[in-house]
Amino acid sequence: MAGLIPQSFIDDLLSRADIVDVVGASVTLRKTGKNYSGLCPFHQEKTPSFSVEPDKQFYYCFGCGKGGNAIGFVMDYENIEYPQAIESLANSMGLEVPREESAQLQQKREKSLELYDILLKASSYYQQQLRHHPDKNSVIKYLKDRGLSGEIARDFKLGFAPPGWQNLLERLGSTADSKKNLLDAGFLIENPENKRNPVYDRFRNRIMFPIRDQRGRVIAFGGRVIGDDKPKYLNSPETPVFHKGEELYGLYEAKQKVRKLERILIVEGYMDVIALAQNDINYCVATLGTATSTAHLKRLFKLVPEIVFCFDGDQAGRDAAWRALQQALPLMEDGRSARFLFLPDGEDPDSQVRKIGSKAFINSISEATQLAEFFFENLCSQVDMESLEGRAKLGTIAMPLIKLFPDGLLRRLILDQLAKTTGVDLNTLSKMSGANASAKDSHPYAPKQAPSEPTVPVKEHPDNSIPKARSKSTHSACKKAVNLILLKPEIVSKIEVDTSIKQLKSNDIDLLFEVIDLAKSFPSNSTHELLGRVYDTPIGSQLIQLQDREQITPATGIENEFKEIMQYLAKIAEREALIAKGKQTFAAKNQ
């Protein structure tokens, strides 16, 4: 529960950090005139296109477009969020990051630090038991039989919770405070009815798998039983530092092993992640006893453009894959990919990779079923495709799912495929899905000509009087405009913005003008400096999410596109003013 990092500290940190030293610690640089150049660490290249400018304290790649200040480089290079990048840079310079906190926030933060401390101590204890406990041989034999080496056990910090009811309690719970922390961290179970052991260890006689967050801190554990006791796997309960629906096992280890992840494979169990890592497949994660959620996928798509789901090939596996597909649909923006790898019956990733080898397994990942293919394969299996009624039913069950896709090329291609499969006209399907397939409306937000004056009042939105069609188009336009400002903040001082646009009252318009005012207040700031000024605020969270999305506008076209969007929004504002005037005239005539 960290508080706000003072802006004065961020400014001081950037003034102390030399961009050449920060980048040079990770990239080989050579002086070229007054600047430095090297091979870009963010994409593969043979000829250097990566430049560091000491005068501006800025880096930029002319090949992939990545650029920013020292904090931005740490964010991009280490794949971490803004606050973690500040902490990483500060730590490298021997500085402690201050926090502006309320008494309540400070109390929560101190409690979290106590839990992280007890979790780390427990992890060390379990690792020590795996090395020295008299019963360790059965655990080591099990791990070796599964093909795991000592090195992989070390990398994932595997441990052993020995048999016994109070081993951890006796080792780490000697005081009232430490015992309370063990309870709060999920290590102990209270059962007053058990007179002999009213408080006892949750994990007993189990192989222990530490679960680490994106900063590498131990936040929870999974335990696999050695014998035949049930349950086979046992996870830590929810705690103030562990929320299982948000975390992914193995993600931290994957980011440590592969500096620039291109793909993530989602499997079902801890041992699957570790067994694949043992075979040099180091981009695997597992959910923690829950189905893959939209929150999981949002997090992963920030890191990689492709996600591959791995399931058993039986009906249960395909049903689970279909549920995962539905979670993925709203996130399938152009440039992202989702695949589905179905394993042979009776095989899991652990057994399959040992059976066919890592090379063949990697090939199977690359050849996994594409989302669109699985989408139609599953839906077509539910209807009689030989009959008109069956094809009509296909359209009926497919359309609500297609509406979940974001506007873009993939959605249009899915519609096109549905049209070919059902024999229904594409324009008809497009209208049913809320998309317009005609060429003249292919632009994501703006019509090619100004809207004509309406003759009939538009039906109003029930909540905020925004017509539904306008609300959708302004949302897309505002989102793009904010993105463009983040890419090039100085455009707000070069292009005049019609303030009548503010009359289009909505949260999107409010956000747009808040960002415009912010950029005007700090015209010389870079993207990351702008984000730093609103970090840990509601607007900051929105902007960081937008900035993380893939940008497709070339640098030379940013100003023109921003100008087009402002003109488009001004036309909508003018149209709405005419509508309002028409309503007033109509009302006056009928009084």
Image (tube, helix red, strand yellow):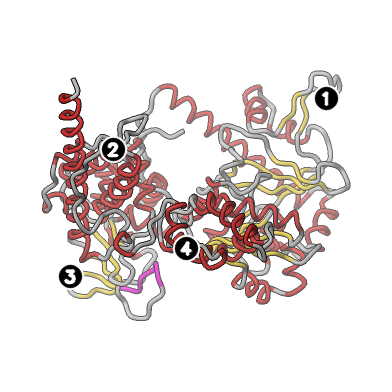
Residue drawn 28% across the image and 50% down it: 477
Figure quadrant of residue 72: bottom left
* Cα distance between the residues tagged 3 and 2: 60 Å
| Residue 39 painted magenta | yes
Percent from the top left, x then y, of residue 297? 53, 51
What is the three-letter code of the residue carrying label 3?
A: Lys
Figure quadrant of the C terminus:
top left
* Cα distance between the residues tagged 3 and 1: 71 Å
Reading the image, the residue beneath label 4 is 425
Nearer mark to the viewer, of 4 and 3: 4
Task: In the rendered structure, find residue 197 and report the number of the disc placed on it.
Answer: 1
Percent from the top left, x then y, of residue 504? 23, 37
Reading the image, the residue beneath label 2 is 458
Residue drawn 47% across the image and 63% down it: 425
Reading the image, the residue beneath label 3 is 34
What's drawn in magenta, residue-wise? Answer: 38-43
